[in-house]
Amino acid sequence: MRLPLLALLARGPAHGYELKQDLEQLLGSAYPPTNVGQIYVTLGRLEKSGLIEGEEIAQESRPNKKIYRLTDAGQEALRAWFEETADEPRVRDEFFMKLALAPRTGLADQIALINKQRREYLNTMRNLSKLAATEDRDNRIAHLLIEGAMLHLQADLDWLERCQEELEELQ
């Protein structure tokens, strides 16, 4: 959450709730809702580390609010983030560990594990399809997020199929 908040602050000062709304509007309903408390905790940490500055703004009929702005150090951290590539493909996959260890324990059948995981992926795919149908058509970022998740799920489904073929050959 640190770097996305810095990215939102790059366009100008904002308070925590405003950042929450901006993030949710940008990513749409496919992205899990952000806890505003977590945003304020993260903003506090960013301020302590010197990546942002906060300024109390007095309000007449409401409690004061704190507006945050990016510092030069925050701008530099954001530039470095955009220069980095995303993590490498996942090799430490929890499902694969279950699949690999199931025969050693005698507690689970590998094909049953694959079928259960396949059902989970297909249910998630259906839910994402429904979500895509209800998401605002003008929010291209949200649609790209949903599409990316669905493509990853399809790749996972293809991989499950490959695992099942290999394991059935061994039997």
Image (cartoon, rainbow, N blue to C red):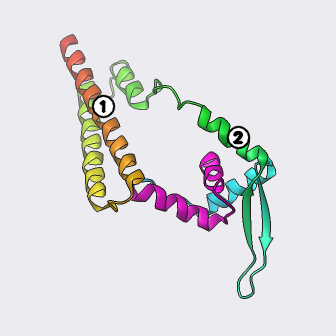
Residue under the point 60% across and 67% down: 18
Q: Quadrant of residue 62?
A: bottom right
Is most of the magenta stretch helix, strand or loop? helix
Q: Is residue 24 magenta?
A: yes
Q: Earlier in the sequence, mark 2 or mark 1?
A: 2
Residue 87 vs residue 10: left or right? left
Q: Which region is colored magenta?
A: 1-30
Disc 2/disc 1 C-alpha distance (Å): 33 Å
Q: In which quarter of the image is residue 17?
A: bottom right
Q: How crowded is mark 2: few (under 14 residues within 10 Å), some or many (20 or more)?
A: some
Report which residue position mark 2 lands on.
Answer: 77
Residue under the point 44% across and 53% down: 31
Q: Which mark is residue 131?
A: none
Name the residue nearer the viewer: 112 or 56.
56
- Tell me if residue 45 comes above or below residue 163 in the rendering: below
> Considering the numbered disc 1 on the image, is that residue within a helix, a strand or a loop?
helix
Residue 2 vs residue 93: left or right? right
Q: What residue type is labelled 2?
A: Ala
Residue under the point 23% across and 34% down: 115
- Tell me if residue 9 comes above or below residue 166 in the rendering: below
Image position, residue 2 (x, y; %): 65, 48
> Considering the numbered disc 2 on the image, is that residue within a helix, a strand or a loop?
helix
Q: Is residue 111 magenta?
A: no
Report which residue position mark 1 lands on.
Answer: 155
Image position, residue 48 (x, y; %): 80, 51
